[in-house]
Image: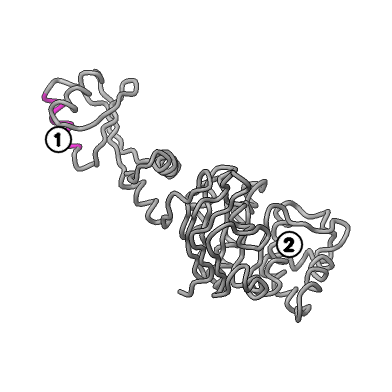
Amino acid sequence: MKVVLDVTNVTKAFGNRVAVNNISFTLHEGEIFGFLGPNGAGKTTTMKMICGLCSITKGSIRICGFDMPKDKEKALANVGALIENPLMYPNMSGMDNLKYYASLYKNIKTEDILKYSKVVGLEHRLKDKVKTYSLGMKQRLGIAQALLHSPKLLILDEPLSGLDPNGVKEMRDFLKTLAKEYNIAILISSHMLSDMEQICDTIGIINNGQLLEIRSMNSLKESAEGSSRIQIKVDYPNFAGKIIVNELQLKCELAGNKVLVFADESRINDITQKLVGYGISIFGIEIVSKSLEEIFLDIINLKTKGKTSIV
């Protein structure tokens, strides 16, 4: 796949404060890359540097081979962006808003406006004033505006924020369709892993301005599935725990009348035989995997402390 965005060793400092610290990543056509991190992590600052809204202190950014800011005009010709809230004129219709933004570019025709209005699912509401739109519809209109000049890269800052559950689902489905069917590279930010896991191909976990790790979503899911623990309900959990640690050399934790054993399901037979042999009654066994949220927090906590392994 062709590289659309190449960010190399980029740093942004505001005086003595480093907002973005030496980050690097690439984004390919048809790929959805998610910036995942808490508020204030550096997501929006990075996006603003890519869009030319914020200067780069160190490093380089190339968009479709064009350098920012040396070839700024050519680079930005390939970018559509929706940073923070879409700015629209509420007393104008959706069509009039798009016509106004189209006038800022060269050679955008009415057919183009109608094409992207259909892409975002607003073709039947173009005559209505924007003030009658829901938040999700305003987000879609903003995305249509960002697509008018047929960019190769679409940048969206927290596009799911404030949407109701139905609006979130519609936006998720729409963005995946946009990437796969139109081969557009999408850079999206969020602080919610639950949103990102259903949209992104790849995520970059950022905290305190540092890009801690880049992982494919499949890799994260495999980490979650590979972190199985065996939860066993017994009558004497303290005694059971000592047996598991001393006899089987397995790590475990106690939670009420349950023992949580850090092992995969292949060890169930060994554990149950050992416990029953010592007269422990077993009332239930359950396989528990780490959630993606736990994996995400592990990465932030361990990488912040300078460690490199999460599972």
**Residue beneath disc 1:** 270
Q: Is residue 197 left or right of residue 79?
A: left
Q: Of callouts 2 and 1, which one flags the residue occurring earlier in the amino acid sequence? A: 2
Residue in the image at 83% along x and 69% along y: 100
Q: Quadrant of residue 267?
A: top left
Q: What amino acid is labelled 1 in the image?
A: Asp
Q: Is residue 270 left or right of residue 181?
A: left
**Residue beneath disc 2:** 141
Please provide the residue range marked out in magenta. Answer: 268-277
Q: Quadrant of residue 50?
A: bottom right
Separation of marks 2 and 1 at Cα, in angstroms: 59 Å
Which numbered marker is on residue 212? none
- Whether residue 273 is in magenta: the answer is yes
| Secondary structure state at the residue bearing disc 2 | helix
- Where is 65 relative to 7, above or below? below
As drawn, the residue found furthest toward the left would be: 277
Residue in the image at 34% along x and 38% along y: 288
Q: How is the image coloured?
A: one colour
Q: What amino acid is labelled 2 in the image?
A: Leu
Residue in the image at 47% along x and 49% along y: 205
| Secondary structure state at the residue bearing disc 1 | helix
- Whether residue 187 is in magenta: the answer is no
Main SS type for the magenta part? helix
How many discs mark residues in the rendered view?
A: 2
